[in-house]
């Protein structure tokens, strides 16, 4: 049987491990929609993509305090590193078996069936794939403002619209306003808890009631990248609602408390039907390497390390907020591994000045105010940071 050029290319892409025809169509549609919206390409995020490729930091190897991406400076654990190194020798094999074992381990940890878990190379990848699937035919996503923009940006590029709902005066998600914003075109409600970039949390019981009520109308996506670092920890998680059958997604990552940002492991909880729809373009976790899977499995067992990490991050946070208070500076109450505070200087200028001190942080502007978001590093790094602030904000 002869093949025309188009069919040959499709089959060739599959043979090379590319995505299947359906995801290719999704991608093509996303690009077409993006180009029709002021020529914005899919990954041209107004805020979030700049976070990962900041041109203003030409040489990160020379910095004294890397406090920009909310990384865990203490990880990965020794157990995770050893498991990673051992698994490298199995790098000639695909990792289906170990991926299945990690999925089972997570199912026992979360109290859900393995079919309610979708693995991916970091939670951001799963957020973005969800947006591609949900918004390929338009619709809108309701989420807080400000918040983490990965899912929202892809939703817009794929053809959807963002219905932004301003946070409350105490920086929590305005759940009533978010519910009121839902209309016939709403495909998803997205909530980051703890929120990024504000580091604040929405009341657990209020959020739980919201999820139970709203998920009967439209799916609710809870991004819990920082949940283990919050004071309540997993007690504040919405994961139990998945087991109870509510139409919600819960995303988790090994990038934060586990200190594995560069190893790219994450997962998403949800009902099987919804996850199967998204899995059509994720290839079932194939993007996660075997060594990363081994490291994640080992890290989950290293409870002493995770507890120690949380304590060290809390120590750095207390040091930072005490310093800000000593200078009479305001800050948002933090429930995670970063602190955000207002600055009386344009964000770009502030970043340039602090980079001159070999310190890298993040700047935001919202509510007509410039802000500095500083990640919690080692105590040595935090001292570099406060010394730099003393010199810049005289």
Image: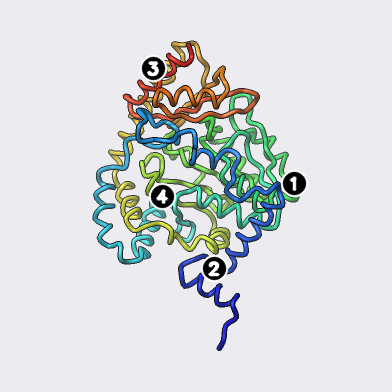
- Mark 4 and 1 residues: CB-CB less than 8 Å, in contact? no
Q: Quick check: 290 above or below 81?
A: below
> Mark 1, mark 2: which one is toward the viewer?
2
- Tell me the SS state at disc 3: helix
Residue 268 appears at what percent x and percent y? 49, 52
Q: Earlier in the sequence, mark 1 or mark 2?
A: 2
Residue at the spot 46% in from the left edge and 29% down from the top edge: 361
Whole-angstrom CA distance, mark 4 to mark 1, is 35 Å
Whole-angstrom CA distance, mark 3 to mark 4, is 33 Å
Residue 179 appears at what percent x and percent y? 69, 40
In the foreground, 360 or 151: 360
Residue 135 appears at what percent x and percent y? 66, 54
Q: Earlier in the sequence, mark 2 or mark 3?
A: 2
- Mark 2 and 3 residues: CB-CB less than 8 Å, in contact? no
Mark 4, Cα crowd under 10 Å, few <14 / some 14-19 / many 20+, is many
Q: Which residue is mark 3?
A: 387
Q: Residue 20 — which label?
A: 2
């Amino acid at each position: 049987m002869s093949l025309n050029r188009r069919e040959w290319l499709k089959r060739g892409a599959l043979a090379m491990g590319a995505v299947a025809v359906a995801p290719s169509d999704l991608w093509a549609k996303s690009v077409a929609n993006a180009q029709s919206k002021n020529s914005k390409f899919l990954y041209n995020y107004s805020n979030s993509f700049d976070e990962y490729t900041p041109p203003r930091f030409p040489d990160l190897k020379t910095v004294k305090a890397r406090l920009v991406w909310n990384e865990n400076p203490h990880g990965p654990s020794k157990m995770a590193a050893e498991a990673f190194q051992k698994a490298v020798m199995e790098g000639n094999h695909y990792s289906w078996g170990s991926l299945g074992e990690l999925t089972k381990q997570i199912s026992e940890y979360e109290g859900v069936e393995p079919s309610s878990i979708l693995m991916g190379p970091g939670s951001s990848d799963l957020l973005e794939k969800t947006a591609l699937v949900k918004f390929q035919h338009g619709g809108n996503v309701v989420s807080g403002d400000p918040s983490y923009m990965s899912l929202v940006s892809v939703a817009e590029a794929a053809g959807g619209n963002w219905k932004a709902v301003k946070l409350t005066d105490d920086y929590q998600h305005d759940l009533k306003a978010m519910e009121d914003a839902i209309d016939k075109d709403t495909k998803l409600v997205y909530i980051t808890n703890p929120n990024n970039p504000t580091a604040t949390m929405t009341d657990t019981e209020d959020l739980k009631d919201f999820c139970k009520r709203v998920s009967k109308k439209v799916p609710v996506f809870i991004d819990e990248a920082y949940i283990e670092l919050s004071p309540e920890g997993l007690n504040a998680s919405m994961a139990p609602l998945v087991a109870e059958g509510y139409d919600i997604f819960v995303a988790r990552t090994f990038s934060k408390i586990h200190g594995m940002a560069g190893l790219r492991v994450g997962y998403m909880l949800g009902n099987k039907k919804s996850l199967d729809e998204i899995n059509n373009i994720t290839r079932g976790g194939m993007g996660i390497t075997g060594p990363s899977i081994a490291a994640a499995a080992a890290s989950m067992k290293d409870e002493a390390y995770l507890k120690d990490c949380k304590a060290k991050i809390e120590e750095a946070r207390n040091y930072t907020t005490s310093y800000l208070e000593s200078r009479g500076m305001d800050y948002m109450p933090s429930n995670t591994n970063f602190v955000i505070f207002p600055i009386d200087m344009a964000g770009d200028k502030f970043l340039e000045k602090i980079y001159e001190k070999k310190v890298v942080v993040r700047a935001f502007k919202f509510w007509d105010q410039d802000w500095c978001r500083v990640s919690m590093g080692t105590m040595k790094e935090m001292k570099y940071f406060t010394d730099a602030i003393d010199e810049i904000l005289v």
